[in-house]
Image (cartoon, rainbow, N blue to C red):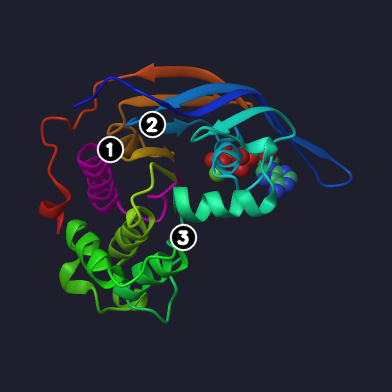
Amino acid sequence: MIEETCETLVSVKDVTKVYDTGAVKAHALRGLTMDVGEGEFVAIVGPSGSGKTTFLNLVGALDVATDGKLNVLGKDLSAMSKRQRADMRLHSLGFVFQAYNLVPVLTAQENVEFVLELQGVGSERRKRASEILEQVGLGEFADRRPNELSGGQQQRVAVARAVASKPKLVLADEPTANLDGENAEILLKMMRGLNEQQGITFIFSTHDPRVVAHAHRVVTLVDGRVSKDEEKEPSTMAQNASPQEQA
Ligand SMILES: Nc1ncnc2c1ncn2[C@@H]1O[C@H](COP(=O)(O)OP(=O)(O)OP(=O)(O)O)[C@@H](O)[C@H]1O
Ligand SMILES: [Mg+2]
């Protein structure tokens, strides 16, 4: 269930982002302010071009703000070097992208192990990767390569990879954009399970109302600002199947 928020993981204050491509300047964020607490499961919605991807890229230390304050996991991002930001992405954050982004020549198991290896995890890599694949219902698919998995299964591997090192925060930019309704539901329930069972905070963007239904907080962006920020009771709370049951 929703717990009292004990710690602010993300604090965004009056952030602006201007993309300067030479001839034109694109004002992607125009004074965006919002906080996300530990344990939240937040959907970011809003029309195309409203700044969702830009927001997630800034919080994920993939890009830098033009102005304003961004504090993520207790760190002031503007005071960090490129190297420190890369370190934070590797060791403290998990990412899920729209296009799965798995390494095509590696099996599901190896895709997860590979990231654990980059993170410096030693001999327990193999066991950890197997466990997390089991948890997302893909135990029996561990030895398959991405092209031998469905889109939904590939995205579940991507989520397994994102959470394998137990990050506090996972950022997902339209994780279900390439999935059909049924697979979108499976993926979201799985993310909710990881959120509830392991306390991992998720921030994900989406255009899909069925996906929004699983969130307990929905933040709407319009023109690079927060236009609505609603807490709600997720519609699937009652069903709330664990990821193991999702295979
Ligand atoms: N790299 C870039 N260079 C120039 N302009 C950009 C760049 N990335 C985004 N923009 C502009 O910034 C604004 C916000 O874009 P962003 O991608 O954050 O929106 P979005 O809400 O994710 O949209 P969508 O729902 O279509 O994914 C848009 O006007 C977009 O054209
Ligand atoms: Mg986007």
Of marks 1 and 3, which one's residue comes earlier in the chain? 3
On-image quarter of the N terminus: top left
Q: Is residue 104 magenta?
A: no
Mark 1 or 3, which is nearer the eye? 1
> Compared to 164, does 65 lie above or below?
above
Q: Quadrant of residue 126?
A: bottom left
Asked which secondary structure carries label 3, the reply is loop
Of marks 3 and 2, which one's residue comes earlier in the chain? 2
Mark 1 or 2, which is nearer the eye? 1
The label on residue 199 is 1
The amino acid on which the numbered mark 1 sits, given as a three-letter code, is Gly
Residue 228 in view here:
yes
Of marks 1 and 2, which one's residue comes earlier in the chain? 2
Q: Position of residue 47 (x, y in %)?
A: 54, 33
- Left or right position of 238 against 197: left
Q: Quadrant of residue 16?
A: top right
The label on residue 42 is 2
Q: Which residue is mark 3?
A: 99
The amino acid on which the numbered mark 2 sits, given as a three-letter code, is Val
Q: Position of residue 172 (x, y in %)?
A: 44, 46
CB-based contact (under 8 Å), mark 1 and mark 2: no
